[in-house]
Image (cartoon, helix red, strand yellow):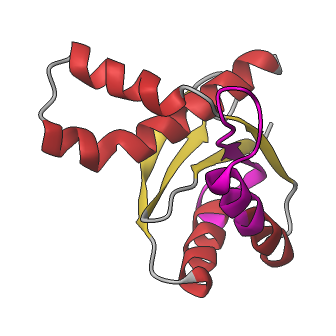
Amino acid sequence: MQRILSLDFGTKRIGAAVSDALNITAQAIGTIERKGMKNDLKKIRALAQEYSAARLIVGLPLNMDGTKGRSAKLAIDFVNELKKEINIPVEMIDERLTTAQGERIFLEADVSRKKRRENLDKIAAQLILQNYLDCNR
């Protein structure tokens, strides 16, 4: 079975996570500091190759009522560019509450605000991927 790469798209950073070889668990692997579309796509392509990803999951930040706001539209535009540059299937899934869930995990673990900010994107990517894996088992 091949691994799945997951992204939590943001305007400043993109969190990344990858599944284990059996697609049971998700592990956070880092963040990409946004430095222009070309650079972002290059880094994502490199991650996909490094982890031999067969699929890419990107969080779709819908509003709580399920509608698409500005963030969702930006994420969709990004995914459309990504699909032109990467030769594996790319799928978007609802990511509502993953950032809040990640924030709660950090608060419960008493992680400092600075550390939360540094790690929230990759934890959100991990939660997005774990939700995907759990739903597709």
Quarter the N terminus occupies: top right
Quarter the C terminus occupies: top right
Closest to the observer: 25 or 129? 129
Can residue 27 be seen by looking at this rendering?
A: no
Q: Quadrant of residue 9?
A: bottom right
Q: Which residues are magenta?
A: 49-78
Closest to the observer: 115 or 3? 115
**Is 78 rendered above or below residue 70?**
below
Magenta segment includes 7 = no
User: Residue at left 62%, top 25%?
Assistant: 130
Q: Position of residue 82 (x, y in %)?
A: 75, 70
Q: Position of residue 23 (x, y in %)?
A: 70, 29
User: Residue at left 66%, top 23%?
Assistant: 131
- Residue 114 shown left or right of residue 11 in the figure: left
Closest to the observer: 75 or 51? 75
Q: Quadrant of residue 17?
A: top right
User: Residue at left 52%, top 84%?
Assistant: 36
Q: Position of residue 78 (x, y in %)?
A: 70, 67
Can residue 51 be seen by looking at this rendering?
A: yes
User: Residue at left 49%, top 64%?
Assistant: 11
